[in-house]
Amino acid sequence: MNIDAPLNFAPYAKQSSAALLQVNRLACERDDRMLYQNLSMLVHCGEIWHIKGANGVGKTSLLRQLSGLLPLVHGQVEWNRQLECPFIYLGHKLGLKDHLSAEENLAWLEALSGVSNRIKRLAALDKVGMRGYEDSLVGHLSAGQKRRVALARLHLTQASVWLLDEPLTAIDQSGILVQQSNLRQHTQQGGAVLLTSHQDLDMANVRILNLSALIKSDQC
Amino acid sequence: MLKYYLCLVWRDLLLVMRQPAAVFNPLVFFVLVVSLFPLGVTPQASQLSQLAAGVIWVAALLSTLLSLDLIFRSDYDDGSLEQLLLGSQPSWLLALAKVTAHWLVSGLPLVILAPIVSSMLFMPYHALPGMLLALLLGTPTLSLFGAVGAALMTGVKDGGILLSLLVLPWYIPVLIFGASAVQAASSGMPMNAQLALLGALLIFALMVTPAATVAALRVGQMQG
C-alpha cells in the first residue's frame, strides 16, 4: 500500500477503531491483464481515501470490486458486519433516467433502500445546490447538474462508506467546494469516503492510494 | 417490500408514458402481421378461421421478441441497473417488477388488441373468451422467459438474433399449448388441458426466472 499523506487517526469518529472495510490481498484481472494485486487496506471511520492512478490502471475496477459488481478472483473484501447499510456506490454512469425529473429519480433510488420521504429528497437536492430543479427532467439538465443530482442521493442513505467514481467530473469550482464540505461532514459523522478523481482534493487529511505506484512497486 | 415493487413498476410505466414510441413498434407489428394474412393467403372466411389461432399466437410471440430488448437496455446504458442491483431489497423482486412493467406495456395491450385483430381472421365469436384466457396466461410467461434472455444480453452490444435463439426454445411450449387452446375453443371443444398446461408453465416461469434473471444481470455487469 502506498500512502503519501500523513496518517489520519480520525479523532472525531464516534465508533472506535473498528475498521469499516477490510481489503485483503485483492487482485483484479481484466482481459487477461493483471491490473493490481496484493492490495490490502483498512478503511476506518472518518477517513477519506483518494484513489489515484493513470487511465486504465484499475480505479473503477477497484470500486466495483468493493461494491460487489465485479467478482473477486483473489483476495477478500470484508465489510463491517455491524453496519446496517455498509456502502453506497456511485459509478461513472450516473444511474439517472433522462425522462424522469430530478425528484422522481431520487424517489426510485431512495426506494432501493426501502424508504420514501419527499421532504428529505428536497433537502438532499438543496444540499447539492439543485433546489428549484426538482421538477426539471434530468435529460434537460447540464452534465454538471446531472452529476449534482446523482450526488444528492448520498444524503438520502444511511450508508457508512461512500464509494464514488469520479464524483467531481463536470462540477464547477463553487460546486466542488460544496461537495468537499459534504464529504468532510460525512466523515465527521463517522463515515468514510473512497473516491477516484484526477483532480487534487483541496482537503486536509486525505489518504492517497496510488494504484500506478502500487503496480510499479510490485514489478520491481 | 410491496412498496418497493410498486415503486419500480410505476417508474417503468412513467418512463413509457414519457416516451411511448418504443412501445408502439411491437404492437403495430402485431397488428400488421395479422392483417397481412387475409391479403397474402386467402380472403376466404372458412380457411382464415382455421389459421386464426396459430397466426395470432405467432404474431404475439414475435412481437414480444421485438420488445424484449426494452426491458433492460436503457437501464444498463445509463447505469440505473448497477444501482438496482446494489439496492438492499431482495433482487428477485426487482426482476419481477421489471417483468411486470414489461408485460403491462407489451403483453397486456396484445391481449386487448387480440379480439379486434381476430375478427379480421374470422375467428368465431364463441372462441373469444378462450383466446383471451389463453393469452392472459401465456403472455406473462413469454415476458418472464424473455427477461432472462434480455438480462443475458445486457453486456452484449448487438445481441438481437442471439437473444431470439436463446429465448425461442422456451417460447415453443407456450406457442403450442396457446394455439391449441384457441383451436379447441373455436371448434367448441373443451380447452381445460391446454389452459392447465399454460398455467403450469406460468407458475414454473414465476418460480424460476426471477432468480435466473438477476444472475444473468450480474454476469452482464462484469463487462461494464
Image (spheres, helix red, strand yellow):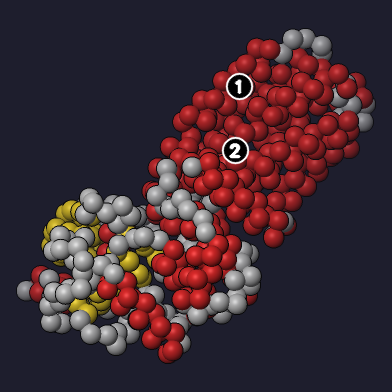
Mark 2 is surrounded, within 10 Å at the Cα level, by few (under 14), some (14 to 19) or many (20 or more) other residues, namely many
Residue placed furthest toward the bottom: A173
Quarter of the figure with residue A163: bottom left
Give residue B137's position: percent from left, percent from top: 65, 27
Chain to which mark 2 belongs: B
Judging from the image, what secondary structure is the residue with disc 1 in?
helix
* Residue at screen point 54% across, 65% down: A119
* Residue at screen point 47% across, 77% down: A128
Query: Which amino acid lies under the numbered mark 1 shown in the image of this protein?
Result: Gly
Residue placed furthest toward the top: B189
What residue would you read off at disc 2? B143
The quarter of the rendered structure image containing the C terminus of chain B is: bottom left
Quarter of the figure with residue B142: top right
Q: Is residue A9 above or below residue B23?
A: below
* Residue at screen point 46% across, 50% down: A114
Mark 1 is surrounded, within 10 Å at the Cα level, by few (under 14), some (14 to 19) or many (20 or more) other residues, namely some
Query: Which amino acid lies under the numbered mark 2 shown in the image of this protein?
Result: Ser
Q: CA distance from mark 1 to mark 2?
A: 14 Å
What residue would you read off at disc 1? B199
Tell me if residue A220 can be seen.
yes
Q: Is residue B10 left or right of residue A166?
A: right
Q: Is residue B136 left or right of residue B82?
A: right
* Residue at screen point 82% across, 24% down: B128
Quarter of the figure with residue A93: bottom left
Give residue A199's position: percent from left, percent from top: 33, 85
